[in-house]
Amino acid sequence: MNKLARSILAKLKSTEESSVLSDFSRIVHSLEEEVEKVRILPTRYFMVFRQYNLIKKLMTYASIHKLDLIASKHVKTTETKINAIESETVARECSRQLTSFVDRLNYVFVNLVTNEKNFLRFFRDSHQRIMKPLMHSVSRFLDVQESLIHTEMEFSNQDLRISESQRGGWIRRVKVLRTILKTENVEYVATKLHSLITESRQSMEDEDERIAMICLRVDAILVEIEEYLNKYAEVLLDVSREELENIRHSLLQSRADAIDSKFVVDRIMADKVRFHRLKKEINCLDRRFVVLEVIKRRTVDLIRGVRLLISPRSFEPIISKMGEIESMPARYSVSNYRHAMKKLRKLKLSLKITQ
């Protein structure tokens, strides 16, 4: 029995450093002295009785020590997790609860040192009611905190197929959830975050379908641009041609980015608007210059008709005007159109011809 007592004592002494109970080493030392005293008792009967009670006491302390090691591990793990909490208020409150648990244990341990069984019951009850819920609360808080951080980083990824306004809205909602996150409302925040993630995934799926449809339209726009470049190759100004080339290049880049899962809807729509604006301008100028060509031909025909009605000397100034009409610029631009129409009006006035 003495051998069993010493074996239990050896286990109690082996891990004193990891104890939550600051006074536990002193208790182990007193137990050693008590074992030594029992060994030198005079009567065998009294020694056996005392050894039996001592073994029961040692086994109770062995149970306390086992629970102490578990609590010590939980305390250290919880301390590490508390240090990872972003909110200073939450971290301070969790640290206060953890310190209160340890201080209360040590206070009761010192005052119930003569009644180890009652302390063991108190230890188990405190660990079950205080330490485990605190561990769960801190772990759950960190899980939600990490989810919020990960979600914000995911929303900040520029490769996501979402608009900048939508991206900004989602990021702001995540930041609000990070701000209001507390141990008391962690489940509420987790529910809101889950709803936001579900909403964002659905939005991104819808956006993928939308991107696929727009990419199909890009090819149609590119074909139309190519037709305009070929159709108006001789009459387009260099500025207009360059802008069409820029739009085509931008659309090709957008289509490539879409294949790489980059968001290009805003860019494609902007290019489409630019092209339709330029297309409208070209079509308008085309109609104007068609009218201008008709007016030029009619004016030349009228001048040739007037030649039969006036003297050759009077007709010489008009001949020079015909050269000006034929040399009018054919490139499509508003300034060229206005300049040509102005010249034709002056010529009409000089001939006194009404249209």
Image (cartoon, rainbow, N blue to C red):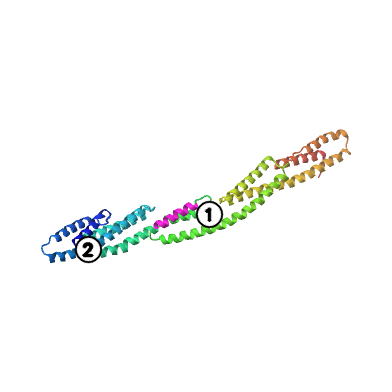
Q: Mark 2 — residue?
A: 116
Residue 242, horizontal then vertical, whole percent: 66, 42
User: Which quadrant, please, contains the N terminus?
Assistant: bottom left
Front residue of 281/192: it is 192
Instruction: Answer whether residue 96 is visible to the viewer in this image.
Output: no
Q: Is residue 106 above or below residue 322?
A: below
Q: Is residue 332 above or below residue 171?
A: above
Residue 90, horizontal then vertical, whole percent: 36, 56
Q: Mark 1 — residue?
A: 166
Marker disc for residue 122: none
Task: Please tell me whether residue 204 belongs to the stretch shown in magenta.
Answer: no
Instruction: Answer whether residue 319 is visible to the viewer in this image.
Output: yes
Q: What amino acid does circle 1 point to? A: Gln
Q: Is disc 1 surrounded by few (<14), some (14 to 19) or many (20+) residues within 10 Å?
A: few
Task: State the residue at coordinates (60%, 55%).
Answer: 212
Q: Residue furthest top?
A: 313
| Region rendered in magenta | 141-155
Front residue of 176/99: it is 99
Q: What amino acid does circle 2 point to? A: Glu
Residue 149, horizontal then vertical, whole percent: 44, 53
Residue 246, horizontal then vertical, whole percent: 63, 44
Q: Nearer the viewer, mark 1 or mark 2?
A: 2
Q: Quadrant of residue 124?
A: bottom left
Main SS, magenta residues: helix
Q: Earlier in the sequence, mark 1 or mark 2?
A: 2
